[in-house]
Each structure stands twice: as C-alpha cells, then as structure tokens.
Amino acid sequence: MHATTNAVPADFLRAWPVWLVSALTGIAAAAVTELYGLAARALDIPMSAGNIGASAAQPITIGMFAMGTVICTFWGTVLAVLLARYATRPARAYVKVAVALTAVSLVAPLGAGDTVTSTKLMLALAHLLAATIVIPTVARRLWHAPGRNGQR
C-alpha cells in the first residue's frame, strides 16, 4: 500500500501572472516597510527629511513608507511584465535593472538635505528592505517566464 500526499508544487508562483506576484509582493513589502517606519519612530529616530539640496526638512508622516513602496513596486511591476513579454532572459534582466534602480534610489535618502544621519540611514535601509522582499520573489516568478526565444 502506497501513501499518497497532496504536496504543494515546489514553486506555486509559476501559475500566477507576473503582475499578480509583483503586486502581492509589493503589498507585503509596503506593510513591512511601514512597520519598519513605525519601529523607527518608537526608537525616536527623527522623522523629517529634505529633498536633495533642500535647506528645510519636511515631516515623514505615517503611511509614507507604504506609499513609497507601492509606487516603486507599481513601476517595478510594469518593468517585470514588459521583461516577461519581451526580454530574452526576463529574470536575469529584471534583477540587473531592479538592483541598479535600487542603488539609484539610495541617492535620495543619503543625499537628503537638512536631515540627520540616523534618518538618512534609516530611510536608505527602508529602500533595501523593500528591495530584498520584492526583487527575489518577482525574479523567481520571472525565471518561469520563457521570455523571447524560450530562454530563461
């Protein structure tokens, strides 16, 4: 007599559309980054930052971490869908572009005017936190997208 199992496939994400995986991952990252921001508030990290070159900082209000993450994930989702459709190797292309864009995104918090160092570092870490949630999950889904010429 053989035992049977109803095992979940090792990668259930492959059955979901790229846009859905990216959107759901973005929502999860938004929640995590917002909680991170709330934790930073509880640790008394100053919650005000200026734009690059600004002489005055503006308050970082509750919800801004989540909003920023959702906006960036929206554009990342557009990128992922386009790469899934047109790139020869969608996962590889996505990782390269997403990592580069994450690096570029660090310029804003690290170069923020009228902003204390602890806030700059906390904001930069929020960018990295969101990226470490979104990029690997979307890349894993894109690995299953055949891309142009059937390559991964």
Image (cartoon, rainbow, N blue to C red):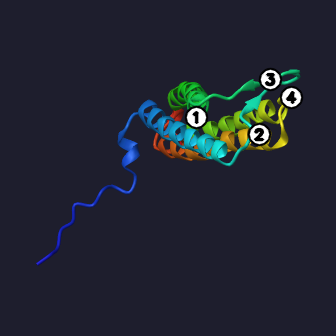
Callout 1 touching callout 3 (CB < 8 Å): no
Query: The disc labelled 3 sits on which kind of residue?
Result: Asn
**In this rendering, is residue 1 above or below 17?**
below
Spot the residue most to the bottom. 1
Q: Which residue is mark 3?
A: 51
Q: How far apart in space, not on screen, are marks 1 and 3 (Cα)? A: 38 Å
What residue lies at 48% left-to-right and 40% top-to-bottom? Answer: 28
**Earlier residue among tags 1 and 4:** 1
Q: Give above or below for 120 relative to 73.
A: below
Q: In the rendering, at what x and y percent does residue 94 appear?
A: 61, 37
Which tag is nearer the camera, tag 1 or tag 4? 4
Where is mark 1, residue-wise?
88
Quick one: quadrant of the N terminus?
bottom left
Q: Amino acid at mark 2?
A: Thr
Q: Residues within 10 Å of mark 4 (few under 14, many from 20)?
A: some
In this view, the mark in front (3 or 2): 2
- For the point 40% across and 52% down, the residue is 11
- Indicate which disc residue 119 carries: 2
| Label 1 vs label 3, nearer the camera | 3
Amino acid type at mark 4 = Asp
Image x and y of residue 140, in percent:
51, 46
Q: Which residue is mark 4?
A: 114
What residue is shown at x 53% (from left), y 36% (from top)? 30
Tell me where residue 66 sits by quadrant: top right
